[in-house]
Amino acid sequence: MSPAARILLVEDDPGLAAGLLSVLEAEGYHMTLARRGDDGLALAEAEAFDCVLTDLRLPGLGGLDLVRRLHAAKPTLPILLMTAHGTTETAIEATKLGAFDYLLKPFEMEDLIGLLAKAVDSGRRAGSAPEFDPQRLGPDAIIGRSRAMQGIYKELGRIAAKPVNVLIRGETGTGKELVARALYQHSDRAKKAFVAVNCAAIPETLLESELFGHERGAFTGAVERRIGRFEQAHGGTLFLDEIGEMGASTQAKLLRVLQERVIQRLGGKDVIPVDVRLVAATHVDLEAAMTDKRFRSDLYYRLNQVTVALPPLRERLEDLPALVGHLAAKHAAVLGFPPSAFPEDALRILHAHRWPGNVRELENVVRLALLRSRGYPVTAAVLLEAMANPVGPGVAAESPDLRRLVAESLAAAQRGDAIDVHARVIEAAERELFSQAIALADGNQAKAARWLNVSRVTMREKLRTFGLKAASDTDPGE
Ligand SMILES: Nc1ncnc2c1ncn2[C@@H]1O[C@H](COP(=O)(O)OP(=O)(O)OP(=O)(O)O)[C@@H](O)[C@H]1O
Ligand SMILES: [Mg+2]
């Protein structure tokens, strides 16, 4: 594309080299030839090229080693690998090491010319685009200077150190958990515990023992005493995430704890005083849930002494460039890429999207785009692809709730923060399966049991365990 572009060709076969040189010079490229891998590396390190085109098998230094060492020295210099020994292994290895792309010999000259133009273009953008500051801010920083976000910061400043329970609201992915942690860090309880419980990730049957603990023998399987989250958070902050998913019985117990400031472990007699600052979060419409009697209004008023309502991303698009910069820096570091820029046209594409998944969706798109770009600047094409399929093929069909539950449970387990991950995830999956099956069968247990190939007894047991309703003539609950 650019007639003045300088290309380094590393090729030991004199016939091939001569052919490539003449074709590419005719295209207007300024060509330099090296016949050995080590010579090629030295030349590329010493001089400014727009692209390196190299063979795989070379004397002195092999093509893959050349890619690795050159990419380490000049991460934005595009390298194209030509190979007659094309296996997927080589291809994967080459791209992993940082090659921009590869060509299988024999290839059409047109393909080479097209690829070369793309590579040169990409390398030049990388050179000219402003690099993102590797962020003095930590990965947990709240990004955004829009009016809406400034309002949030002021509110957080006013309430963080006050003894009030806070309800954080906002659509999925708007940063509720981030804000909960910020509240904690700016509170006078910052030196005490911050304990987080995701009410949606824990089956109702286990949530109460998770929150309040249990004594040994309190129920089948309670082989040891367990200290609950409330006790762990004593003196500090308890974050109840997805509070809208909490079942009726747990709501009742939680209300009592808030009123009386004491807990009782399940199966225990002792009354244990707890001093806990409660921060709750939800993306559901709690007012509607109250109308439907799914959420207690007395609990609502206890939790909601102050509300922080986070704006959806589409209402603060002016924060998009800063968010992209922050997320790109964060994930480039995780993925081991140099910080890479999102050029103007890419940002324009991001601007046009509605972001139903808010910052989390943006984060997924940025991560995937970085992964696909392998450290080179993110092009519009790559970005559109990442947005079309933010989770990658094969996973999209799965329930996002389950996938998220699994991810969150595993993350909690890695922090040493979860018990019975396997049992919980299986239980949640089962609950989903049985609840959908019985609904689809219009409450007909025999039909649902047949579909799932389980016995009627099992079906009845599961319905009872999960508190699901069957048709009245086959009512499982006696
Ligand atoms: N203002 C922001 N600045 C930087 N990162 C953000 C911001 N808001 C959200 N994020 C990031 O987006 C992701 C989702 O945020 P978070 O988990 O806090 O959302 P949430 O509101 O709790 O979502 P959900 O309702 O789905 O649980 C996190 O990785 C978080 O770090
Ligand atoms: Mg959350």
Image (spheres, rainbow, N blue to C red):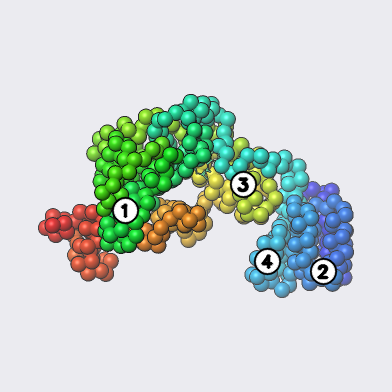
Q: Going 43% across and 31% down the picture, which residue do you hit?
A: 308
Q: Which residue is mark 2?
A: 61
**Residue at image mark 3:** 330
Q: First in sequence, mark 3 or 1: give its number.
A: 1
Marks 2 and 4 sit apart, C-alpha to C-alpha, by: 16 Å
The disc labelled 2 sits on which kind of residue? Leu
In the rendered image, residue 71, in percent from the top left (x then y), is placed at: 75, 57
Q: Amino acid at mark 4?
A: Glu
Report x, y in % for residue 435.
Answer: 27, 56
Question: Can you name the residue that lies furthest to the left here?
Answer: 473
Q: Nearer the viewer, mark 3 or mark 1?
A: 1
- Work out how far the residue at label 2 is from the one at label 3, CA to CA, in angstroms: 34 Å
**Residue annotated with mark 1:** 214
Q: Which mark is residue 112?
A: none
- Which of the labelled discs sits on residue 93, or is there none? 4
Cα distance between the residues tagged 1 and 4: 52 Å
The amino acid sitting under disc 1 is: His
Residue 317 versus residue 418 in the image, above or below = above
Q: Is residue 432 visible?
A: no
Q: Residues within 10 Å of mark 1 (few under 14, many from 20)?
A: many
| 101 sits left or right of 284 in the view | right
Q: CA distance from mark 1 to mark 2?
A: 65 Å
Element at label 2: loop
